[in-house]
Amino acid sequence: QVQLVESGGGLVQAGGSLTLSCAASGRPLSSYAMGWFRQAPGKERDFVAAISRSGSSTYYADAVKGRFTISRDNAKNTVYLQIHSLRPEDTAAYYCAADGRYYSAAYFQTRDKFSYWGQGTQVTVSS
């Protein structure tokens, strides 16, 4: 099975940018569709973005369209989430997730579609 480790979180001012990384080990990243979720204190873990195994399709939550970009580098076994124009409401723990099913990114919009999860990285946006 695959192990996932997120990095790149931190404290950022509103309006700034950040790139989160999710490094996979144990199995080739190309074997998995990948997703990013986030969870603010006291709230549910919400879908942010997903990318298919080949990277040919991506899908975003409406709340982040235009500001977030998911990408992957299978050769480096890493998935990225670029975040621009950060807002205080983006403050959350960000989790990456993986699943071996071979569907387009739009299929992977809910937590139950993913089999493997990382431990998360905290993003805090100050106003």
Image: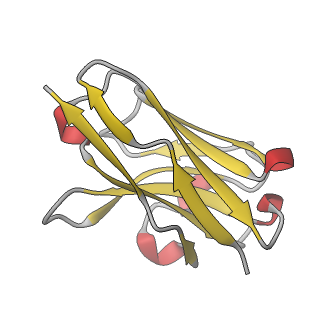
Q: Residue at x 23, y 67 (%)?
A: 44
Q: Quadrant of the N terminus?
A: bottom right
x and y percent of residue 77 in the render? 77, 53
Q: Which quadrant of the view contains residue 14? A: top left
In this rendering, would 20 be left or right of 67?
Answer: right
Identify the residue at horizontal 58%, vertical 75% (top origin): 116
Q: Residue at x 65, y 47 (%)?
A: 79
Q: For this rendering, which residue is in front, 62 or 10?
A: 10
Q: Residue at x 61, y 65 (%)?
A: 4
Q: Find the residue positioned furthest to the front.
A: 11
Q: As displayed, is residue 15 above or below residue 122?
A: above
From where the camera sits, is residue 16 visible? yes
Q: Position of residue 60 (x, y in %)?
A: 46, 43
Q: Is residue 91 left or right of residue 7?
A: left
Q: Give the vertical position of 37 relative to 18 (above or below).
A: below
Residue 124, image x, y percentages: 26, 41
In this rendering, the count of numbered labels is: 0
Q: Is residue 60 left or right of residue 62?
A: right
Residue 43 percent coordinates (x, y): 17, 64
Quadrant where the C terminus sits is top left
The type of colouring in the image is secondary structure
Specify whether residue 103 is in view.
Answer: no
Work out whether 83 lies above or below 38: above
